[in-house]
Image (cartoon, grey):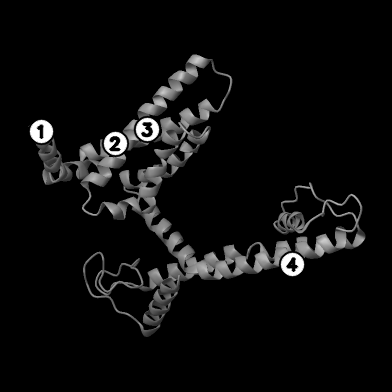
């Protein structure tokens, strides 16, 4: 009984050891210290090695002993990633914020496939998801410009989401309608592959996206004419989402260039920024900028 009490005390002391948490945090999350940079380089090397192991394991011309070695190495790397994931949770003051963040989810998915492979055959091939963790290389070598550009892209996608959703819903209605019409045209023909509406909708999607597998083809003149119409429609609308995101990115980039500091004359400030991130001077805001920011926030709140 005393042993259990001592064990519990040690566990509580471990959970509330702030000095240890700060030390782990400096190694895991900070790349400015020698230990932190070394840890990130080892981690990236482990990620690359893990991905190579998955690729080699999918090639079925190695002897059985080689596959055993590959699997053992994979288990060791997974153990390392699991410890690293738990260390991230341990040293943070708000662990749930990390767990449900993009990188937290990627870190979890980097370890789960191996454990799932004990129950689901072939699931360990999902370990290629670890490639997303290579984004850490930008942080190590201080390529913050790339991170900034990535944030600009994500922000543009987020703002464009309502327009893209409406466009997607429109395309969904369009392919459903066209698939149904093709079923009415081709379905009555003997030996037709348009024998039900789901098959016809699948054909409409493949045709409109200009993929054209050729597994289902119309045989009647009216069906072929209608196919040509669908292909032309696909060519005209396939670039719409790209145009929406590109236009939003241009607007975002112009908004960043507009926000120039009156003291140090440097730009690149976020539209909602009040002070210069370089010298701390107060930024001037035009009425049009305020209106754009308010509209942008309203859009984001609707999402």
- Category of crowding for the residue at label 2, using alpha-carbon neighbours closer than 10 angstroms: few (below 14), some (14–19), many (at least 20): few
Q: 34 or 115: which is nearer to us?
A: 115
Q: Which residue is mark 1?
A: 1
| Residue at image coords 40%, 24% | 73
- Category of crowding for the residue at label 1, using alpha-carbon neighbours closer than 10 angstroms: few (below 14), some (14–19), many (at least 20): few
Looking at the rendered structure, which numbered label has been put on residue 177?
Answer: 4
- In the rendered structure, the answer to whether residue 200 lies left or right of residue 88 reads right
Q: Which of the marked residues, 4 or 1, is nearer the chain's N terminus?
A: 1
| Residue at image coords 48%, 14% | 65
Q: Which of the marked residues, 4 or 2, is nearer the chain's N terminus?
A: 2
Q: Which residue is mark 3?
A: 78
Cβ–Cβ under 8 Å for marks 4 and 1 = no
Structural distance between the alpha carbons of marks 4 and 3 = 48 Å
Callout 3: SS: helix
Q: Is residue 297 above or below residue 150?
A: below
Q: 246 or 102: which is nearer to us?
A: 102
Residue 190 showing in the rendered view: yes
Q: Which of the marked residues, 3 or 2, is nearer the chain's N terminus?
A: 3
| Residue at image coords 91%, 58% | 220
Looking at the rendered structure, which numbered label has been put on residue 83?
Answer: 2
Where residue 234 sits in the image (x, y, percent)? Answer: 72, 62
Q: Which of the marked residues, 2 or 1, is nearer the chain's N terminus?
A: 1
- Category of crowding for the residue at label 3, using alpha-carbon neighbours closer than 10 angstroms: few (below 14), some (14–19), many (at least 20): many
Residue 29 showing in the rendered view: no
Structural distance between the alpha carbons of marks 2 and 1 = 30 Å
């Amino acid at each position: 009984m005393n042993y259990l009490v001592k064990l519990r005390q040690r566990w509580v002391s471990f959970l509330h050891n702030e000095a240890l948490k700060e030390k782990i945090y400096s190694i895991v999350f900070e790349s400015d210290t020698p230990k932190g940079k070394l840890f990130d380089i080892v981690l990236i090397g482990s990620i690359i090695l893990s991905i190579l192991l998955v690729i080699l394991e999918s090639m079925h011309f190695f002897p059985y002993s080689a596959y055993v070695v590959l699997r053992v190495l994979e288990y060791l790397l997974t153990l390392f990633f699991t410890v690293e994931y738990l260390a991230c949770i341990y040293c943070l003051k708000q662990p749930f914020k990390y767990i449900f963040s993009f990188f937290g989810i990627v870190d979890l998915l980097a370890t789960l496939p191996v454990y799932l492979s004990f129950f689901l055959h072939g699931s360990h091939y999902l370990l290629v998801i670890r490639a997303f963790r290579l984004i850490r290389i930008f942080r190590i070598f201080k390529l913050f410009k790339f991170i900034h550009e990535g944030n600009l892209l994500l922000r543009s996608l987020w703002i464009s989401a309502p327009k893209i959703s409406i466009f997607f819903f429109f395309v969904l209605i369009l392919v459903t309608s066209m698939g149904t019409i093709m079923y009415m045209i081709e379905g009555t023909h003997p030996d037709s592959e348009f024998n039900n509406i789901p098959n016809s909708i699948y054909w409409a999607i493949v045709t409109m996206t200009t993929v054209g597998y050729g597994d289902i083809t119309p045989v009647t003149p009216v069906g072929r004419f209608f196919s040509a119409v669908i292909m032309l429609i696909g060519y005209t609308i396939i670039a719409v989402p790209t145009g929406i995101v590109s236009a939003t990115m241009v607007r975002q980039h112009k908004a960043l260039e507009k926000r120039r500091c009156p003291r140090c004359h440097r730009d690149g400030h976020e539209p909602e920024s009040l002070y210069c991130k370089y010298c701390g001077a107060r930024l001037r805001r035009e009425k049009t900028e305020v209106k754009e920011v308010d509209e942008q926030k309203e859009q984001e709140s609707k999402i």
